[in-house]
Image (cartoon, rainbow, N blue to C red):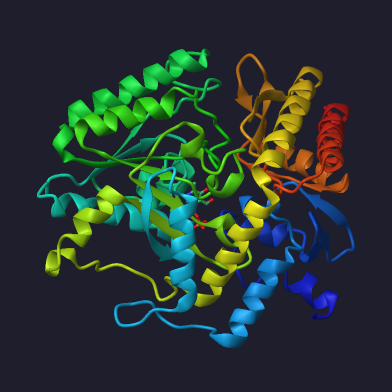
Amino acid sequence: MLDSNFLRENNSRHFWHPMGIPAEALQNPPPIIVEASGNRIRDLDGNELLDAVGGLWNVNLGFSCEPVKRAISDQLARLPYYSTFRGSSNDKVIELSHLLTEFFAPEGMGRAFFTSGGSDSVETALRLARQYHRLCGEVARTKFISLRSGYHGTHFGGASVNGGPRFREQYEPLLPGCFHIPCPNAYRNPFGETNPERLASLCATALESEVEFQGPKTVAAFIMEPVLGAGGVVVPHESFMPAVREICSRHGILLISDEVITGFGRTGDWSGARHQGVKPDIMTLAKAITNGYFPFGAAMLSHEVADAFERENGPDGFIGHGYTYSGHPVGAAAGIACIEETQRLNVVENAAARGDQLYHGLLRLKEKHEIVGDVRGGRGLMLAVELVSDRKLKSPLPRNEVDAVHSSIYREGVMVRISGSNLLMSPPLVLSEQEAVEILNAVDAGLSAHASTH
Ligand SMILES: Cc1ncc(COP(=O)(O)O)c(C=O)c1O
């Protein structure tokens, strides 16, 4: 490793942080993480922290998952790269695609299209959705509908279906033909509805009405996260996704379930759609598919969608889309090892149990700390604490105060993530009961530190 003074001097000087403000990072450069093992990370100053972020919602099996590390290094030695563009394939991508179609058979998935990450998977899903309709003779079906507050990555297509202004404003004009409906977040919604079930029904009605307004035969797909992640962990009522499925099916609209976070066990089930008993037409995957150890992703397609492509052996069936790293053999090897380990450890059970423990612990902290406006979770290891300066007005806590809470929690030895005025938590799915207590204690201490200075 380079000399630590060099690293401190050059921190944030020669690259920009995604989702950061370069000028702010220059003034206040972030901690430099240099090592990790188990569920813990270590920074350059020697602080050891429990990683309640799990990398970035992706290190589901922790930082010491030897089978995945071994699969990567063995594959690097045997075949470090070969393309899967028309004309060649590799053994690992064949094996992984077979495993994935078995893994997601309950969701009805029949084919995989490989990518380098979540944004690529979303882009693939949107593009193939349009092509599917063309292949079915419905060339007018080009529009996309999605949820406000949803997050689908940062490519132009994904940014266009994103529902957060922070990811859109600076990059407009975005893709034409993208429309948004209210998000079923019982804490903040335009209906002032606090009952999750009634709210789900209002949002589903909004979708129906948007479809009618646009003209049902012009809509290609509706995309949603079964549990919204980056938008502040919103758990829609269990009636919502089935209602969306029904509306989409009735109007011939494809349902894309963006499972970049929720795939592979994070919600306490193997996918968000499965938890809701919903079969989507397309699923997007990334993150935990390789435990975060290799950039990789996939769009999975139902048998029905796949059939439309596979029936057409002419130019219209040509998929003019793909990435140099689609089906990368090292990523595929990591993916195979990851699925095997994920199943061997049956991580869904622990994700559900630890998720419950954290959710109820955070709800107790809400009783104690006035700045906690809302606690969201209750569906596995996806949790958010929304901080407010006034509970009645629900006014977001100012950014500098959120940063101060974050720093206090860091000093207590736990890494959480800030998104707007939310503290987000998405620890590895192999978190222990004692580690969950550590997270709760550190968040408690961070919130108490705020109270003592305000
Ligand atoms: C639901 C969802 N979709 C897509 C993406 C984009 O993935 P990536 O950052 O790997 O491009 C993310 C990233 O957090 C996500 O949470």
Identify the image quadrant of the N terminus: bottom right
Left or right of 202, for residue 250: left
Which residue occupies the foreground of this view, 181 or 173? 181
* Image coords of residue 57 (percent x, y): 62, 50
Which residue occupies the foreground of this view, 382 or 351? 351
* Image coords of residue 39 (percent x, y): 79, 54
Which residue occupies the foreground of this view, 353 or 30? 353
Q: Is residue 278 visible?
A: yes
Question: Looking at the image, which residue is at 48% across and 69% down?
Answer: 95
* Image coords of residue 31 (percent x, y): 77, 59
Q: Is residue 124 above or below residue 197?
A: below
Farthest residue, direction left:
137
Which residue occupies the foreground of this view, 5 or 349? 349
Left or right of 34, for residue 340: left
Residue 199 quadrant: top left
Question: Looking at the image, which residue is at 44% across and 41% down?
Answer: 165
Question: Looking at the image, which residue is at 81% across and 62% down?
Answer: 37
Residue 321 quadrant: bottom left
Identify the image quadrant of the C terminus: top right
Q: Is residue 117 visible?
A: no
Left or right of 52, for residue 271: left
* Image coords of residue 374 (percent x, y): 65, 24
